[in-house]
Image (cartoon, grey):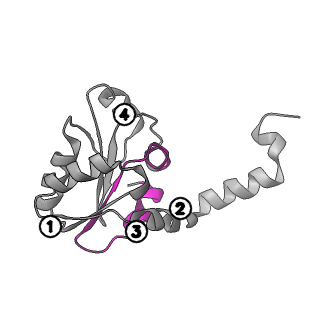
Amino acid sequence: MNHRLKALAATLREGEAALVLSESNRFYYTRFAADAGALWVTSTEAAFLTDSRYTEAACRVIRDIPVIESDGFFADTVKTLAKKGIRTLLLEDDTLTVAARRRFMKQANGVELVTDSTLRRRIAEARLKKDDRSVFVSVWLRRSPSRAFGIS
């Protein structure tokens, strides 16, 4: 897992997993841009799920976690996580439609779904934590923005 995923994983308790659905958060954690897909994260591992349209491209970009091709990603995710002992799945509350939430609830198979703001708050908390490299780049860009954009 990259340092960003590790920061999110550190916010998860034993038996919990996060299902990241928003395009912006999937990109933040994987650096892969696509309009479809999901990212699940536990305290010890993560995987990116996508359909057959994006599998090859995702494998080229995402190298630190498995890329799994799945057309029924939610049902597959719940089954996989349940086998790993996950009892609670946190979902991004601002990305789910009412219909999707109902569909997910039907497919939960005994895994508790948390669809309030819990995951959104934990992602925000994890994104605030910066590693040394991120701090260095941020300071460098503030001190020398012209170098960052190739302006003399």
x, y percentage for residue 120? Answer: 45, 62
Left-right relation of 135 to 41: right
**Front disc: 3 or 4:** 3
Alpha carbon separation for disc pair 1 and 3 = 20 Å
Question: Which stretch is magenta?
Answer: 2-28
Reading the image, the residue beneath label 1 is 85
Q: Amino acid at mark 1?
A: Gly
- Residue at 10% from the left image edge and 58% from the top image edge: 109
Q: Nearer the viewer, residue 72 or 127?
A: 72
Q: Which mark is residue 127?
A: 2
Question: Please, what secondary structure does the residue beneath circle 2 have?
Answer: helix
Left-right relation of 111 to 40: left
**Front disc: 1 or 3:** 3
Q: Residues within 10 Å of mark 2 (few under 14, many from 20)?
A: some
Reading the image, the residue beneath label 4 is 58
- Which quarter of the picture shows residue 53? top left
Q: Name the image quarter holding the N terminus.
A: bottom left
**Front disc: 2 or 4:** 2
Asked whether the residues under the numbered discs 3 and 2 touch, taking CB atoms below 8 Å apart as contact, a structural biologist would say: no
Alpha carbon separation for disc pair 2 and 4 = 22 Å
Query: Where 102 falls versus 16 (above or below)?
Result: above
| N-term mark: 2 or 1 | 1
Q: Amino acid at mark 4?
A: Ala
Q: Nearer the viewer, residue 122 or 152?
A: 122
Q: Residues within 10 Å of mark 3 (few under 14, many from 20)?
A: some
Query: Where 130 falls versus 74 (above or below)?
Result: below
- Residue at 36% from the left image edge and 50% from the top image edge: 96
- Which quarter of the picture shows residue 82? bottom left
Reading the image, the residue beneath label 3 is 118
